[in-house]
Image (cartoon, rainbow, N blue to C red):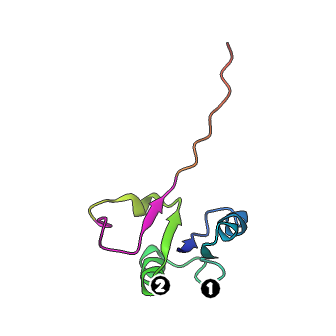
């Protein structure tokens, strides 16, 4: 699978996904760092990549309807705070 990681994800994921035999690169590697969402989306789709991002602007299911693109995973890292007992 061709996967593009947004600039808000750790670069170490490239190595992890590559070891799983995915063709993986990042927004910064493609020279798109700092570009707006529309530019990132267009470049990702034009190249046929599945986009993984933490940008919640991409979580709008009406704008990014499943089956109309090469794939999208808006990913939110949950940080669980320790709770005193």
Residue labelled with disc 1: 31
Indicate left or right for 74 with 63 as reference.
right
Q: Secondary structure at mark 2?
A: helix
Indicate left or right for 41 with 67 as reference.
right
Q: Nearer the viewer, residue 34 or 31?
A: 31
Q: Position of residue 9 (x, y in %)?
A: 63, 62
**Callout 1 environment at 10 Å: few (<14), some (14 to 19), or many (20+)?**
few
Circle 1 or circle 2, nearest the eye:
2
State the residue at coordinates (53%, 79%): 35
Q: Position of residue 23 (x, y in %)?
A: 60, 77
**Callout 2 environment at 10 Å: few (<14), some (14 to 19), or many (20+)?**
some
Q: Residue furthest front?
A: 21
Residue 40 included in the magenta stretch of the image: no
State the predominant SS element of the stretch in magenta: loop
State the residue at coordinates (68%, 27%): 82
Q: Nearer the viewer, residue 14 or 62?
A: 14
Q: Position of residue 3 (x, y in %)?
A: 55, 73
Q: Are marks 1 and 2 in contact (CB under 8 Å)?
A: no
User: In which quadrant of the rendered view does residue 71 lie?
Assistant: bottom left
Q: Quadrant of the C terminus?
A: top right
- In this picture, which residue range is highlighted in magenta? 63-75
Q: Marks 1 and 2, Cα distance to the nearest angstrom?
A: 11 Å
Residue 74 included in the magenta stretch of the image: yes
């Amino acid at each position: 699978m061709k996967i593009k990681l947004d600039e808000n994800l750790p670069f170490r994921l490239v190595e992890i996904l590559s070891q799983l035999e995915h063709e993986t690169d990042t927004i910064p590697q493609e020279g798109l760092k700092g570009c707006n969402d529309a530019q990132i989306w267009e470049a990702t789709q034009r190249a046929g990549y599945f986009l993984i991002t933490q940008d919640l602007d991409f979580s709008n299911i009406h704008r990014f309807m499943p089956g109309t693109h090469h794939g999208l995973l808006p990913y939110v890292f949950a940080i669980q705070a320790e709770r005193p007992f």
